[in-house]
Image: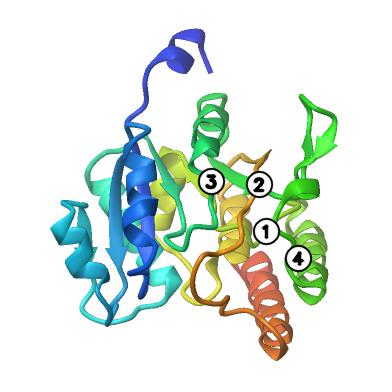
Amino acid sequence: MSKEQRTTTPKVLVIIPAYNEERTIVPVATSVTKLGYDLVVVNDGSHDSTRSLCEEHNIPILNLPYNLGIGGAVQTGHKYAYLKDYDIDIQFDGDGQHDETYIPALIEAIQEGSDLVIGSRFVEEKTKGVQAQAQNFRSTKLRRVGIRWLSFWIKLFSKQRVYDPTSGFRAAGKKAIRLFAEDYPSDYPEPESIVDASKKSLKISEVPVQMKERKEGTSSIGGLGSIYYMMKVSLEIAIIAIFKRKERW
């Protein structure tokens, strides 16, 4: 990428998928707008006050008629970014786990030539010589085992090393926005979409971030659900890697 391209201010959209996030959506959205970024909340069929709170506080919102799940909500955001010709979009959770101060680092990585950038809890912080994981909110042991397994599995099938494949804190450049607007996994999309992006010869990278403990609600992946998740996603990754045609995007 040329110096001129790197110094041009990109048009950035922050996508906040939200399902029943009435307790956190306003402070999360406010934290993003304070940094000067455009944002849109994708209200995934919430049956609490998420919609009315966004409308009351003039937070841009797309209201889905019923719950599509995380994949459908995020793809709606990618479609919106594609139609509005954004250069970069950022997936940012509405539950308070993500730290908005890391958004510029994701944007910078896109400007340096990556197509998809993962905000990772497990990559080395080069500038400090420490791991971001050290100060992160610590997930369950079973979930950490699952993340390591998926990292290995993705490397096995796609030759792409990603240390935090389940992270929902991600940035997409124009190529990835177009790809995900057209085709995006539905259930547990982050690991599967990494393999799909790799098959399309997109450049994938990670930047170190820290995550916070969610302020409300519980993860949809826990206990026996973690085992189901690993089995299902492992199978989907294998199918994508084996049967999807590799091509330039």
Numbered disc total = 4
Q: Find residue 8 and report its horizontal and vertical position in percent.
A: 38, 16
N-terminal of the pair, mark 3 or mark 2, is 3
Q: Is residue 4 above or below residue 170?
A: above
- Determine whether the residue tagged by mark 2 lies in a helix, strand or loop: loop
N-terminal of the pair, mark 4 or mark 2, is 4
Identity, as a three-letter code, of the amino acid under mark 4: Ile
Q: Find residue 205 and report its horizontal and vertical position in percent.
A: 65, 40
Identity, as a three-letter code, of the amino acid under mark 1: Pro
Residue occupying image coordinates x 44% and y 71%: 70
Q: Are dots 1 and 4 in contact, CB under 8 Å?
A: yes
- Determine whether the residue tagged by mark 3 lies in a helix, strand or loop: loop
Tell me the residue that label 1 is attached to.
Answer: 165
N-terminal of the pair, mark 3 or mark 1, is 3
Residue 210: which numbered mark, if any?
A: 2
- Determine whether the residue tagged by mark 4 lies in a helix, strand or loop: helix
Q: CA distance from mark 3 to mark 2?
A: 7 Å
